[in-house]
Image: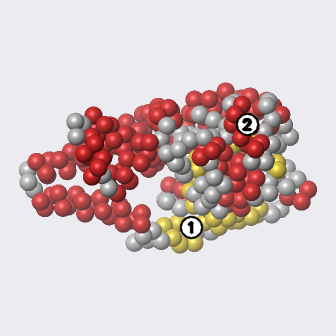
Amino acid sequence: MVERPGGQVRAAVVGTGLIGGSLLLRMHAAGLDVIGWDPDDDTRREARRVGVPAPDRLVEAVADRDVVFLCGPLPTLPATLVEVAVATGEHCVLTDVGSAKEEVAAFAATRGLTHRFVPGHPMAGSDRAGLTAAGPDLLTGAAWVLCPEPGRATTAFRWLAGLLVDNFGARVVPMSAAEHDSAAALASHVPHLLAGALAGAVQRSPLRDAILALAAGSFSDGTRVAGTPADRTANMLLGNRDRVLRELAGVTAFLDDLAAALRAGDAPALTARYDEAGASRAALRDRRFDAYDRQFPVDGDHTAEVSWLRELGVAGGHLIGLHVDVNTVSYAARRPAAD
């Protein structure tokens, strides 16, 4: 990728809602040369009000940029990717922040863009929306999935991963697009279904107001994402529909086990199922990591490099740093410690 004199990176963010706006504000605060663009006139004016350039035309925003983040609604990504690719040079790295990866990755491949498009997904968010809900710290330290591909695409991945680690303190999680979509189904998408189901059942209950008066942390925590804008949730679920439905079946089966034990008055079975569930919760809270560093030749076997990266992500690991010199790319990685 092209390095500017003095290391200055020129970035653009297309779509400046919650995630895109937080990207924009963070890079602006970090002193990067960053431009924002949004199809909404008021949003562009808000960006200018906080001191970030936001031209009226998309082509002006992305011209002569080193990296462009595509942050619009999931269904708009393919068309936006094509438009931005045409308006940018071959040196420009393109990435997105969408919650489903396989479809947009496959689309990029059909358009010959794999060498400079790196599918991405920062695992952070809020039940609020828009640039006014964004903040420069929303994505700091987030697990940030990137989907590396071998060959020329590996160069774009390395450059982008370094940018995210350096400017966001990101824990870069390398995965294939298919692996991401399977993992995200249970980590993020099915929880939206469950939160919606619980909150929706309360909304339909004749005792709704009494329930809300009694609601404490378990209800509030369990339904938080039900407050996410409905169209955003619908786009996410439909964008990963097959995997969400498959993983939902597993959740339903576990819920059936709980219900069967409850129906039978079987305290040992009920306790066993909650012990099983508690182990997952404890693993989330008490995770420990070991160093898992690795070096590869810059111009060596990119297939081996990408295989190692994807294996790291699937194992629950992440990158905390990387360095590329003339001959070698050095990854600083962390992987969950053995129990």
| Placement of the C terminus among the 4 image quadrants | bottom left
Residue behind mark 1: 334
Distance (Cα) linking label 2 and label 1: 39 Å
Residue 105 position in % (x across, y down):
61, 37
Q: Nearer the viewer, residue 282 or 110?
A: 282
Amino acid at dot 2: Arg
- For residue 326, which quarter of the picture? bottom right
At horizontal 66% and vertical 45% (from top left) the residue drawn is 21
The residue type indicated by label 1 comes to: Arg
x, y percent for residue 234: 46, 32
Work out whether 48 lies above or below 326.
above
Q: Nearer the viewer, mark 2 or mark 1?
A: 2
Mark 1 packing: few (<14 Cα in 10 Å), some, or many (20+)? many
Instruction: Residue at 80%, 57% (x, y): give it.
Output: 31
Would residue 115 be seen by someone viewing this image from the given angle?
A: no
Image spot of residue 258 (x, y percent) = 20, 50
In the figure, is residue 290 to the left or right of 297? Answer: left
Tell which residue pokes out farthest to the left in this image: 264
- State the residue in front, 108 or 98: 98
Examine the image and state in which quarter residue 94 appears: top right
Q: Earlier in the sequence, mark 2 or mark 1?
A: 2
Q: Name the disc covering residue 238, or none.
A: none
- Residue placed under numbered mark 2 in the picture: 44
